[in-house]
């Protein structure tokens, strides 16, 4: 197999020039588009393995581009570049089909790590987990469209924060997720909470799932790092 092909979509030439060069040095074959329409044309002519896409762009912005490719059943993984915003905006972006996001400004090393994590997931699953409406793992079923959780076919209930936490973790299985990352996804930077808020919601989920922290089958604590969703995930409905 040749190099992994990355399509970088951003209307800022300073960003595309420096970031494309960094991705090339990191071992990727990187091409550039300056808006969503240009990106669609490039995908039709030469599909990449993954797209890194800005949100605010002329002609067609990142979210419209994302919706367009998902409506066309194009399951190329997409990482969105966003400004720090509310947790609801980030959840909306993920629900629209983004495989992950990273806040501007960012460390290019973090972007490469997210690219590698998303590529690992895309190799394990034929379809994008974040574009699926219903996911299952062992006795757990999560209906993302209806915001419902079932254990062994019986509906169970949790807080909204806990559901958002579980939703992010089940769509990012086998990836070590730091408390800071989970805090950012679920609460957003506009809500000041410490890491204990994440731990409390993890505790809520473990009670809901009947998961033993000492011998976990769903959520593992990774010392000094965060948490990882362990169970193999199945797509029930896309």
Image (spheres, helix red, strand yellow):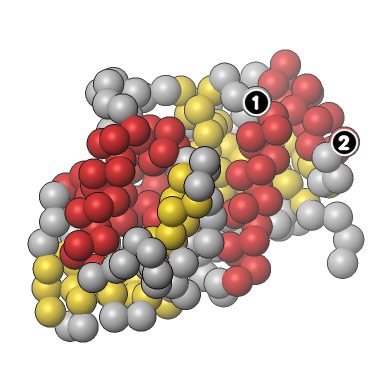
Instruction: Assess disc 1: are there few (<14), some (14-19) or many (≥20) residues with their C-alpha within 10 Å of its C-alpha.
Output: few
Q: Which mark is residue 25?
A: 2
What percent of the width, then of the height, locates residue 196?
Answer: 29, 35
What percent of the width, then of the height, locates residue 168?
Answer: 37, 52
Q: In this view, does 110 lie to the left or right of 61?
A: right
Closer to the camera in the image, 59 or 165:
165
Q: Which residue is drawn at 29% across and 68% down?
A: 211
The residue tagged 1 is 107
**Can residue 66 be seen from the camera position used here?**
no
Residue 167: quarter of image? bottom left
Residue 88: quarter of image? top left
What percent of the width, then of the height, locates residue 117?
Answer: 62, 53
Q: Which residue is drawn at 78% across and 23% down?
A: 17
Image quarter in which the N terminus is found: bottom right
Mark 2 secondary-structure assignment: helix
Closer to the camera in the image, 229 or 146:
229
Residue 76: quarter of image? bottom right
Disc number lying in front (1 or 2): 1
Among all residues in the image, which is located at the extreme top? Answer: 14
Q: Which of marks 1 and 2 is nearer the N terminus?
A: 2
How far separated are the C-alphas under marks 1 and 2?
15 Å
What percent of the width, then of the height, locates residue 6?
Answer: 73, 46
Q: Decide: is 57 above or below 42.
A: above
Mark 1 secondary-structure assignment: loop
């Amino acid at each position: 197999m040749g190099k992994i092909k990355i399509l970088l979509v951003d209307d800022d030439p300073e960003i595309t020039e420096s970031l494309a060069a960094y991705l090339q040095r990191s071992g990727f074959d990187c091409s550039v588009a300056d808006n969503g329409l240009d990106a669609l044309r490039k995908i039709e002519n030469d599909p990449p393995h993954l797209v890194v896409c800005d949100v605010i762009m002329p002609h067609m912005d990142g979210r419209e581009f994302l919706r367009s490719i998902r409506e066309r059943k194009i399951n190329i993984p997409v990482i969105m570049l966003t400004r720090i915003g509310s947790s609801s905006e980030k959840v909306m972006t993920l629900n629209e089909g983004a495989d992950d996001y990273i806040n501007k400004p960012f460390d290019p090393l973090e972007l490469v790590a997210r690219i590698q994590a998303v590529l690992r997931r895309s190799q394990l699953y034929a379809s994008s987990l974040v574009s699926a409406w219903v996911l299952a793992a062992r006795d757990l079923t999560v209906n993302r469209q209806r915001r419902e959780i079932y254990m062994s076919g019986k509906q169970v209930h949790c807080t909204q924060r806990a559901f958002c936490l579980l939703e992010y973790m089940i769509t990012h299985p086998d990836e070590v997720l730091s408390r800071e990352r989970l805090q950012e996804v679920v609460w957003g930077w506009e809500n000041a909470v410490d890491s204990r808020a994440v731990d409390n919601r993890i505790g809520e989920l473990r009670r809901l799932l009947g998961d033993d922290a000492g011998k976990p089958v769903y959520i593992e604590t990774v010392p000094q790092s965060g948490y990882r969703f362990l169970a193999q995930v199945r797509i029930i409905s896309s």
